[in-house]
Amino acid sequence: MAKKEKLETKTSTFIVIGMIAVALIITFFTINPFRSSAQDKQIIRVAHNQSSDHPTHTGMLAFEEYIEDELGDKYDVQLFPSELLGTQTNMVQLTQTGAIDITVASNSILETFNPQFQIFNLPYLFEDPEVYHAVMNDPEIVDPIFKDTEEAGFVTVAWLDAGTRNFYAQSGPIEEPADLEGLKIRVQESPTNVRMMELLGGSATPMGFGDVYTSIQSGIIDGAENNELALTENGHGDIVKDYSYTLHQMIPDEVIVSTALLEGLPEEDAAIFEKGFEVMESTQHEAWALKVEEAKDQAENEMGVNFSYPDIAPFKEAVMPIHDEILKENPSFQKTYEQIQDKALEMSEETNENDEN
Ligand code: GCU
């Protein structure tokens, strides 16, 4: 045999051996009778963008524990915090395809997947946190929105508390809308938030949560708006020392689940997952209430952040046109909007009655 031919025969022999080896490895891992039972379990990937010290993670841990206690022989719940699997927008897309099973996404960014979520992103929609909680806990109000995304590949199974959103900027306290003029303020990636900033006179810079710290530090933006945990858990309080309670939004985080997962669950397991979502939600809410108090204390006393409490009336007046704009563009939102107003009215009447008695 000529030298060249010999070499070609040798090369093709190596290729064939290589292919057989890969096939054997795949077969081994697929039908190996000795593989551990962990490999037989269905992996449930749960992703979010908060640290592992955040109440959201506490809620996810409670879910993991509950599911594995009840169905540990079948499911292995794996948690991916801190944007490990991408920004919230990336994670929602991966949930739609079923690559991630469960994602926590701010209601803000969900409006780009289904416009109906927009309603809960309206500034000054809720009178106070009590009305906000009562609305979010009322299936008659939220379910038509939470369950409407099935065709888009996910549904919302729980809501998590993310407190109130307030402004913080390196230039000093935001006492009135004029203080926002000329400032580049990071907002979540949502058209409603961009419009809100326009109405307040600031310049909206939408970006993922994970980029905010370095963007403030490097001067790409002048400030942001978020709850108190952004100061502590995300360290924003290290670089911004003024936080103003404008209370402009109460935006929940939604727990979305891939329809691919839900459709594949046997009925009896689905009931346990449902209970698991309740455990996750109530654990997160309790952890939130404690953590937010701790965060205020830590920001003020350890990080040197000054809290200010401006008159919110001028902020409210500046942004209220957005309510009419959005309702005009989407007449189908009117029903939910009225249900929210009715809930607020009902609650204030109850309070008045109790005060009289
Ligand atoms: C809050 C909220 C997150 C969100 C973040 C943001 O922390 O809980 O879900 O991603 O704000 O401003 O992006």
Image (cartoon, helix red, strand yellow):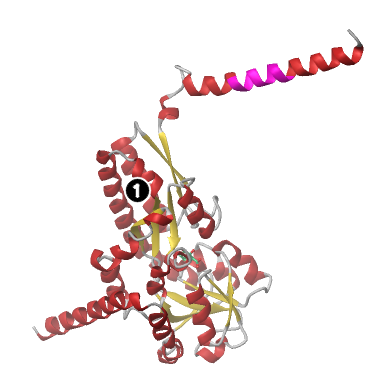
User: What kind of residue is marked 1?
Assistant: Ala
Q: Is residue 17 magenta?
A: yes
Q: Quadrant of the C terminus?
A: bottom left
Q: Quadrant of the N terminus?
A: top right
What residue is rendered at 47% in x and 20% in y? 31
Q: Residue 355, how many percent across, how many down?
A: 14, 84
User: Magenta segment, which residues?
Assistant: 15-23
What residue is rendered at 64% in x and 69% in y? 215
Q: Is residue 203 left or right of residue 329?
A: right
Q: Nearer the viewer, residue 265 or 212?
A: 265
What residue is rendered at 19% in x and 79% in y? 346
Identify the residue under disc 1: 62
Q: Residue furthest top?
A: 1
Q: Residue 17, how many percent across, how many down?
A: 69, 16
Q: Residue 123, how many percent across, how many down?
A: 41, 80
Q: What kind of element bears circle 1?
A: helix
Q: Is residue 265 left or right of residue 192?
A: left
Dominant secondary-structure state across the stretch colored magenta: helix
Q: Residue 198, how many percent across, how many down?
A: 54, 84
Q: Nearer the viewer, residue 268 or 347?
A: 268
Q: Is residue 56 left or right of residue 138?
A: right
What residue is rendered at 38% in x and 66% in y? 252
Say if residue 103 shows up in the picture: yes
Q: Is 101 above or below relative to 43?
A: below
Say if residue 174 shows up in the picture: no
